[in-house]
Image (cartoon, rainbow, N blue to C red):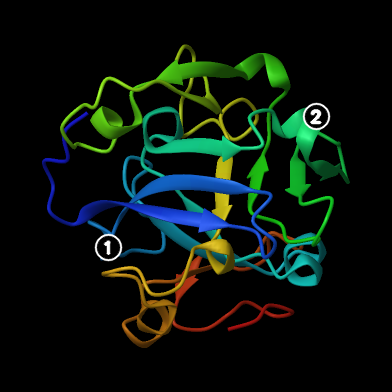
Amino acid sequence: MSVSNPNRRPYKGSCHCGHTKYIAFLELPPRVIDANAPYDTTRIRKCNCTTCVKTGSFSVRLANAPTDFVLLAPTDPFKGLSSYQCGDKTSHWFFCTICGVRCLTFAVDANNSEIVDIDLEEWLGKESKGKSTKVWRPKQEGWDEQKFETSYLSVNATSLDAGQEGLDLREWHEKGWIVYLDCLDYKEENRLGRPCRGGQY
């Protein structure tokens, strides 16, 4: 896959001990900065629900998770990571079994994902070296970023590896890119600038 948009770049992420490793394509700054940005763009969010607040979630939704995300290690999060589930138990809040860092949330079951061999260099938009890499990713078939119940993957921004070109989490707040959500009781509208009650900057 070639990287045609200069603002769309691959970013590496990991847990603290390195047991979890992934790559996600992000568009920074996001193409649309709006409280209700379209689903086909990078969306940076902070939610005020008790799960997000207590787990320190800083959610980044990708423009199209099946093409924008690969988990390099472990190759099966359902076996190699622990999963916290709450509420209706549809979301898997995956976290490392060693250091406890949570890198991603996947809100559908294992049947909506796949373990495949890909040419990682080619996927990154580089010249192929003819090497195959085993990765886990959501399945493209049936995936629709607008359908939370069947198509949800988010990356925890705090697990993105620091020091990468174009990545400065301070900038996300300073430039007003973060959308604050009210998923605590849905009484407030999504907004930029200030967290909903019970939320955090």
Residue, x 58% and y 17% (percent of image)?
Answer: 114
* Rendered view: 49 above or below 200: above
Image spot of residue 6 (x, y percent): 12, 53
Q: Closer to the N terminus: mark 2 or mark 1?
A: 1
Residue, x 69% and y 50% (percent of image)?
Answer: 19
The amino acid marked with disc number 1 is Leu
Q: Is residue 189 left or right of residue 145?
A: right
Query: In this orientation, which residue lies closer to the viewer: 79 or 91?
Result: 79
The amino acid marked with disc number 2 is Lys
Image spot of residue 4 (x, y percent): 11, 41
Q: Splitting the image into 4 quarters, where does residue 140 fall?
A: top left
Quadrant (top left, top right, bottom left, bottom right) of the C terminus: bottom right
Classify mark 1: residues with Cα within 10 Å, few (<14), some (14-19) or many (20+): some
Q: Is residue 69 left or right of residue 75?
A: left
Image spot of residue 125 (x, y percent): 20, 36
Q: Splitting the image into 4 quarters, where does residue 138 fall?
A: top right
Q: Is residue 189 visible?
A: no
In the rendered image, which residue does mark 1 sit on?
28
Query: In this orientation, which residue lies closer to the viewer: 118 or 29?
Result: 118
Q: Is residue 170 left or right of residue 46?
A: left
Alpha carbon separation for disc pair 2 and 1: 32 Å
